[in-house]
Image: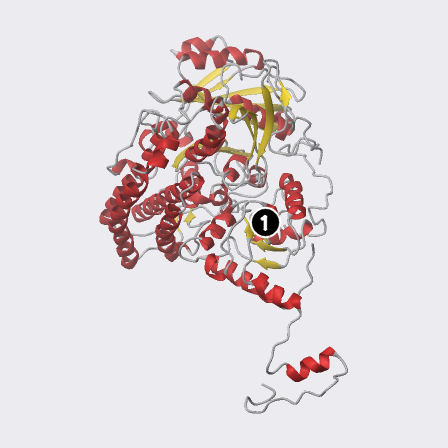
Amino acid sequence: MANAPSELPIVQSDPKNIDELREQIEPLIHLNTLENLLNQARSRSLWPLTFGLACCAIEMMAAGASRFDLDRIGAGVFRPSARQADVMILAGTISRKMAEPIKTLWDQMPSPKWAIAMGGCTIDGGPFKYPGQYAIVEGADKLVPVDVYIPGCPPRPEALFAALFKLEEKIRAGKKFNG
Amino acid sequence: MQMDSRFQVEQDAENRNTYYLNMGPQHPSTHGVLRIRLHLEGETILSAEPIIGYGHRAHEKMAENRDYLQFLPNPSRVDYLAGMIYNIGYCQAIERMLGIEVPERAEYIRIMGNELNRISSHLLWLGTFLMDLGAFTPFLYVFDDREKILDILDRITGSRLTYCYGRFGGVTLDVNDEFLTCVSNFCTYFSDRMKMFEDLVIGNVIFRERSIGVGIFSQDLVNQYAISGPCLRAMGHANDVRKDEPYGIYDRFDFDVPTRTEADCFARSLVRMDEMRQSVRIIQQAVSDIPDGPFIAAKVPKRIRPPEGDYYFCVESPRGSFGMYIVSDGSDIPYRHKLRTPSFSNLSAMPAVMAGTLLADTVAILGSIDIVVPEIDR
Amino acid sequence: MIADKLTSLVQDSTDVEYDARGYNKHHVAPADTLLQVAEVFQSEDFYLEMITCQDRRETDTVFRLVYQFTRLKSPQRHIIHTDIAPDAVPSSIVSLFPSADWYEREIFDMYGISFDGHPDLKRILMDEDYTGYPLLKDFVDPPTPYRSEEDADG
């Protein structure tokens, strides 16, 4: 804390700009622009898209279920419709045939939106990558802009939690959205 | 992406107003990336065409590019809900090809792993099937029990979902008495939970209304579509690979094969619930009979070179009969490795059952067949 | 018995040791008697467990189709090999066993073999406009943005 609680800051009259004013008041009153306030709210109520592709989907379901409960961090409301979702958790291997639907779904999601690549397959193809492979897309970032990558095959539900916390930090830091 | 020009209402030859509705590949009830193109008149389904391939990961091509040991992580990911059964099944196939004898202790450990995996798969089926029908509570309850099983298997394998625990000739690590105590405690606990599930689910009027009489499989579908697993047993046939073609040491265990005759969604559900009880029986026998000894065969060849020819080996997965057809040319890389998966056959029978049902029944029928899409697409 | 009905239709039948191989009998049938062989199995209450294919063009200059029939009651498993020339069109057995529908589509998708009499022969696992037959031994996937070419560590 810049000033001790007993000392009130002296606010100069006619500050040169908003930043100077904010610097003086910040220790006592946290002045937010509206966007920061919205980011605080968005980060604490992420609505994921139900988008399990393969094995990682089961760990995502386990993260949403009773032991690991995503709902206690506000991210438990899985929306089947892309138009109501904020974050697309790509859980599982992306096959070539699935690339088009994923792009469509990403476009259907309204801004602000984020993407989490869960599992080795969405990072760079995972165990299904070999020279000359014909079946999969090597990494979700070839299709959508990914914010957080979770390694693992499959990653534990605690890893999904860590990823969501990282994403929340990113949102609160005022990351510019990609939508 | 070209839009299918048939996505509009049209009048067909019999003056009915029909339209096409696309379900999937992203849909909460299709249990993975399955797409079904439904031809509807109002809410009645005239025909359903499953379109698969959205989960194709080229397992069979990978098998031709690597040797038998390098392929070991793959079977678990073919059907991740029965990862242990598939992984150990692959090890057993190779052992039979080479004539490797597995020590007794390893066989008992494998049986315990298999049956625990079967219970966890059926539990997940129960949770998701009921969630599709609108009940959210059982989903949370079954995941709680499933986590207990996953904790037990995590102790010895290190993974929760996709196991690579089997090795040619045995298993990777030994189990200790603490593990056996955990397993038998779980069995005692689970028997009471089964009673709770039956009270919660079987008597529920909405569940009964939505599943009794829905999706009846006729008897000729058996030979037409090679149906196996609980779908077959709900049609009155007491066929189970563990009894018909015993592998491992299943012939030493005393368990029943539950059957029903109605062949509707309700019958399939009851068969799976009964199978969970039978799996508990098997595990309890395994825990009491497990001998001491080595957990992996002493002499396993460093290079796996099966004699030339065709081999077929099948195991009972929670979804049906899973078979591996391996063609060896004498080298350490298989010439052809075909995975014959039960969901592929069971799903191909679905269009025959769908004509005349309502749209809401699609979800019930699909859920009761219990498919895992990456197993269909491999 | 099934062996008698098949003698006129197949080129070779051998008994196989079940414990080592997992099936009971092995037959080699020519491509033109395929439908009749399938009829024999259907009349004996067998069902089609799977159809698959082996690319044997390098070793034997043929594609080898593999049909597998099993029976529920008094179980027996039969595997039939049918060798066809690379551009041949074998007949489809969908009329007898509807489960062959998807298996034959998969063989078409992965090997390029068309089946005469199949109601709707289109790709099943790959995209409908994909060119190339992946499970052929000499298959090379054309360059694509979905795969990083410079990564060669297998």
Residue A75 image position (x, y, % from top left)? 51, 57
The furthest residue to the bottom? A7
Q: Quadrant of residue B65?
A: top right
Amino acid at pointer 1: Gln
The relative height of residue B119 versus residue A141 in the rendered view (above or below) is above
Residue at the (46%, 61%) spot, across then down: A72
Residue B250 image position (x, y, % from top left)? 30, 38
Instruction: Choose between B310 and B261: the one closer to the eye.
Output: B261
Instruction: Choose between B322 and B294: the one closer to the eye.
Output: B322
Residue A131, visible in the rendered structure = no
The relative height of residue A161 versus residue A135 in the rendered view (above or below) is below
Instruction: Choose between B301 and A156: the one closer to the eye.
Output: A156
Residue A145 image position (x, y, % from top left)? 67, 54
> Quick check: A147 left or right of B209?
right
> Quick check: A1 left or right of B209?
right
Quadrant of the snapshot with the N terminus of chain C:
top left
Name the chain letter of the residue that bears numbered label 1.
A
Secondary structure beneath dot 1 equals helix
The furthest residue to the right? A16
The furthest residue to the front? A13
Residue B239, visible in the rendered structure = yes
Q: How is the image coloured?
A: secondary structure
Residue A102 image position (x, y, % from top left)? 64, 44
Residue at mark 1: A84
Instruction: Choose between C60 and C55: the one closer to the eye.
Output: C55
How many numbered marks appear?
1
> Quick one: label 1, few (<14), some, or many (20+) residues within 10 Å?
some
